[in-house]
């Protein structure tokens, strides 16, 4: 589980986002516009769900013991 999360959520996701930023910059957008257009609400929700999965899940398991 940790390897797959790291691979898909960190490596693949980051590579895709960096590629999108590079394409946006090549298309003439400024850095700020490229970042705000590429990183949206669904990205924030995805990142927060990963943080919740890894940290809230562990703390809840320790609390229930």
Image: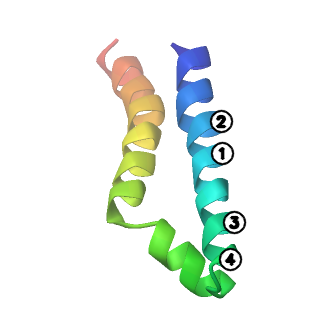
Residue 11 marker:
2
Where in the figure is residue 52, as x and y percent of width and height? 39, 40
Vertical order, 39 against 65 (above or below): below
Crowd tier of the residue under label 2, counting other residues whose Cα lies within 10 Å: few below 14, some 14–19, many 20 or above: few
Label 3 or label 2, whichever comes before in sequence order: 2
Residue at 58% from the left image edge and 48% from the top image edge: 16
Tell me, for residue 48, which label it has, or none: none
Q: Position of residue 48 (x, y in %)?
A: 41, 49
Residue ID at (38%, 47%) = 46
- Of helix, strand and loop, which one carries label 1? helix
- Residue 9 place in picture, x, y as percent: 53, 35
Q: CA distance from mark 3 to mark 2?
A: 16 Å
User: What residue does disc 3 label?
Assistant: 22
Disc 2 and disc 1: Cα gap in Å? 6 Å
Reply above or below: 3 against 57. Answer: above
Residue 49 point in image, percent of width and height:
36, 42
C-alpha span from label 4 to label 3: 5 Å
Please tell me the numbered disc located at residue 25. 4
Judged from this view, the residue extending furthest toward the front is: 27
Front tag of 3 and 2: 3
Whether residues under marks 3 and 2 lie with C-beta atoms below 8 angstroms apart, the answer is: no
Check contact, mark 1 vs mark 4: CB within 8 A: no
For the residues labelled 2 and 1, say whether their Cβ atoms are less than 8 Å apart: yes
Label 2: which secondary element: helix
């Amino acid at each position: 589980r940790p390897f797959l999360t790291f691979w898909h959520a960190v490596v693949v996701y980051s590579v895709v986002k960096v590629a999108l930023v590079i394409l946006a910059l090549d298309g003439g957008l400024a850095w700020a516009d490229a970042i705000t257009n590429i990183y949206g609400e669904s990205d924030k929700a995805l990142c927060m769900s990963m943080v919740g999965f890894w940290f809230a899940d562990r703390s809840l398991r320790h609390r229930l013991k």
